[in-house]
Image (cartoon, coloured by chain):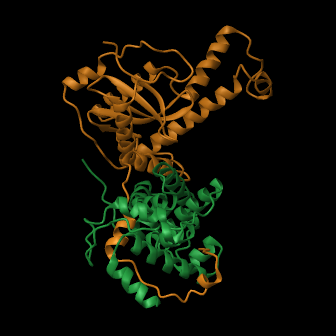
Chain colours: A green, B orange
Amino acid sequence: MVRRRLSDDPDVLLAAARRGDHDALEALLRSVHDRMAAVARRMLRDPGDAADCTQEALIRVVRGLAGFDGRSSFSTWCHRIVATTALDELRRRGRRPVTVPETDREPLSTEPAPEQASLDALALADIDSALACLPEEFRQAVVLSDVADLDYPTIAEMLEVPVGTVKSRVARGRSQLRDLLGNPAVASERRMGEE
Amino acid sequence: MDVNDARFDDGDEPMEALPDDVLTALRSVEIDQLARERAITAALAAAPGQRRFSSTSLLGAAAAALLVVAGAAIVLPRGGDDSGVTIESTFDAALADGGELETIGTETADDAAGDAADDAAVIEQRVASEEYSADEPAAAEAAPAVDTVIDTDDEAEEADAASSLDDGAVTPEELFDEAAEALAAIQSGDLKPPVTDCVMMGGGPVRISRFRGVEVVVFADLANGSVTALATSDCSFVVAYQPEP
């Protein structure tokens, strides 16, 4: 039995995939799938829609591989594609931004969280709920910045807003996210800084 | 709060990174393995010039088939009533001999030549189908190799046969026969997966084929003597069979 061994280096896989190496292409897709799925999930929130979005984005990746210019990393390029696909889906739905009044935002946990909360203690359900409470614009900005790892100019181009607006939305979104996740130490520090 | 308020547009607000645990949680989502395999299979199928499925994607598609079959009722084939087909015991005999596990090789010059010959054969079949299509007499007349429009039963049957060759298997039994032939060919060494689009998984052959014009992944379950075909385009069911008790 001979099993072909593939390189772990994304650049090597990418070069092989662009030459038509099917196995390299598959390895490449597998390496980026989960993060792309996370971007789609955080953008769209619905698991089914996110799965469809991820699949469509992967197909776009494959079809656009020949045109990938290498100015960004392959993974960043893939993140941008899935984010664009998700934004297209949001626009197609015609969803309007949902703004949650300040008074409605309560910390998700009534128990004081430790200053250095562990991932184990940070329930994924809390993250979902906290993201759902963020205004749509803030959520998109935070996801594009912190999940898709896109830079501000790229996000600004995708969202069709100035870079300054993106920075503000990311800052406000992160701040609200921390507050919503009930980290009193960080939230308090932020409030003191703002005062 | 108006997020489009000008005070949010200056970008001068203090920028603090999220804690690592929050970042990790943000990037961690539950991955639906079936959706994952479906997405990757669909993307690979969309690749330019990528008509073959690697062993891994075949296994993924077969795993998806197993997952779906486990939770679904048997689905009748599209566009026909072929229920009640009894799957013969070819696979039972193979099972008695002991199942083979996945065999993966590399492409050889002979394989490539064989593929080219196969491709040529397919092209010939398609030409024959187009030239002798009973449904399109005008096209048949226009074809230089055909002198008369087909009007006899024998010729019509011949045309149907050519057409069905082009569309792949028509009945589930043919799909089963393909799987049985693949199993025998793998065991005899005539097929060298994955070049042949056929691998062994769980003791049964998995291969890419066509059923009524739809490209499918065919998975044969030796233990149950059943055969399942999923469309390669979206992993949707095309046909699934179980033997009669």
Q: In this rendering, is residue B123 above or below B19? A: above
In front: A177, or B51? Answer: A177
Q: Is residue B179 above or below residue B36?
A: above
Query: In this rendering, is residue B40 above or below B71?
Result: below
Could you say where residue B4 lies in the image, as x and y percent from the top left?
64, 76
A186 relative position to A22: left or right:
left
The residue drawn where x is 33% and y is 33% is: B205
Q: Is residue B112 visible?
A: yes
Q: Position of residue A44 (x, y in %)?
A: 52, 57
| Residue B127 falls in image quadrant | top right
Closer to the camera in the image, B238 or B164: B238
In the rendered image, residue A186, in percent from the top left (x then y), is placed at 35, 81
Total number of numbered labels?
0
Position of B195 with respect to A134 (left or right) is left
> For the point 26% across and 26% down, which residue is it?
B223
Residue drawn at point x = 37 percent, y = 53 percent: B31
Residue A83: x and y in percent read 54, 64
User: In which quadrant of the rendered view does residue B174 lie?
Assistant: top left
User: Is residue A28 visible to us here?
Assistant: no
| Frontmost residue, A67 versus A91 | A91
Residue farthest to the front?
A: A103
Residue B152, compared with residue A63, is above or below; it is above
Residue situated furthest top in the rendering: B153
